[in-house]
Image (cartoon, helix red, strand yellow):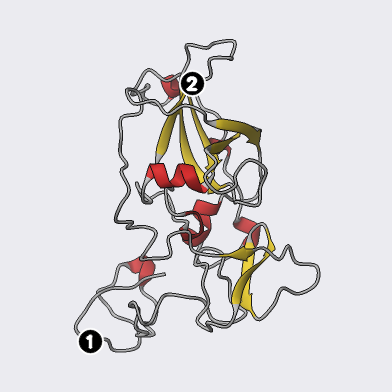
Amino acid sequence: FWSGCRPSCTPGIHAFDPPEHRTPWSCERIDSSHPDCAEDHTDCIHLGCCKNKSHKCFMKDPGEAFCGPSSPKGWLGHVIRPHHLLGDASHPDDLVHGQDLSKHWHGDLHSTHYWDCSGQGCDADHLQPWDKSKYISPPEYAPMDPEKFGGSLYGEKIWMTGATSDAVSDLLGPDANNCGSDNGGGGGCGQCLMVKNHQANNKDWSIVIMRKNRCPPWSHGCGEGQFHMDFAVP
């Protein structure tokens, strides 16, 4: 998707657009009175809102959601909503982020592990044109040894990816580092946490884990206000 601020707009292809976005402009206006929401029967999983205000964004399966008046039989049926209802989740106004977590520790993080061969939520918006068969997790999302890729920054022993609850997304702040976007979970794609487990065999080890997915509120341990992160481990 591509949009931009300009004094006027002519529908069609604009020669000076970046090559990867050189597709016809619709010139549809996007502002507070014309939000960037999905049309009926189009995928809304990373928007969480519908142009038809009487309709909702219903989850069909873990990778797709569509706007409509009700959830068809056989769908998961969860309603996807923007986590930050005021403004763009990529630019929240009142969050503190970018902290050096090697110095400022936040206790009581609860975690489990998972591995999902399908794609991670932060990446779905970047797969254009959409092709569900190509929506997969690359091997690099599994745990990696920093010493094989230039070395650690904070003395961490492992790099990982994972899925966060919305409470953790709030702490991480907006999407960053060109690592995807996820309005449904309030941002945080591409942001990282440093984690230690004092019950681990190597309790002095720390890991850096990047948010690449959302642990939605209906998942165990990820309800409203719960500080939770699932680690991606094959």
**Which residue ends up furthest to the bottom in the rendered image?**
10
Viewer-proximal residue, 22 or 231?
A: 231
Mark nearest the camera among 1 and 2 is 2
Question: Reading the chain from its start, which is encountered first: label 1 or label 2?
Answer: 1
Q: Is residue 65 left or right of residue 165?
A: right
Q: In this view, does 27 lie above or below 17?
A: below
Mark 2 surroundings within 10 Å by alpha-carbon count, few (fewer than 14), some (14 through 19), many (20 or more): some
Q: In this view, does 176 lie above or below 6?
A: above
**Which residue ends up furthest to the left in the rendered image?**
7
Q: Do the residues labelled 1 and 2 touch (CB within 8 Å)?
A: no
Count every numbered label the image shows and give the total: 2
Task: Give me the residue at 45% from left, 54% from top.
Answer: 186
Can residue 39 be seen in the rendering of this structure?
A: yes
For disc 2, the marked residue is: 196
Indicate which disc residue 8 carries.
1
Q: On the rendered image, what quadrant is the C terminus found in?
A: top right
Q: What residue type is labelled 1?
A: Ser
Task: Give me the residue at 19% from left, 83% from top.
Answer: 7
The picture places residue 13, in percent across and down from the top left corner, at: 34, 82
Can residue 190 be seen in the rendering of this structure?
A: no
Q: What residue type is labelled 2?
A: Lys
Viewer-proximal residue, 75 or 2?
A: 75
The picture places residue 201, in percent across and down from the top left corner, at: 59, 10
Task: Give me the residue at 51% from left, 63% from top.
Answer: 46
Task: Give me the residue at 52% from left, 31% from top.
Answer: 109
Q: Is residue 113 left or right of residue 5?
A: right
- Helix, strand or loop status at disc 2: loop
Q: Is residue 16 above or below residue 232?
A: below
Asked which quadrant contains residue 155, the reply is top left
**Which residue ends up furthest to the right in the rendered image?**
74
Indicate which disc residue 234 carries.
none
Asked which quadrant contains residue 230, the reply is top right
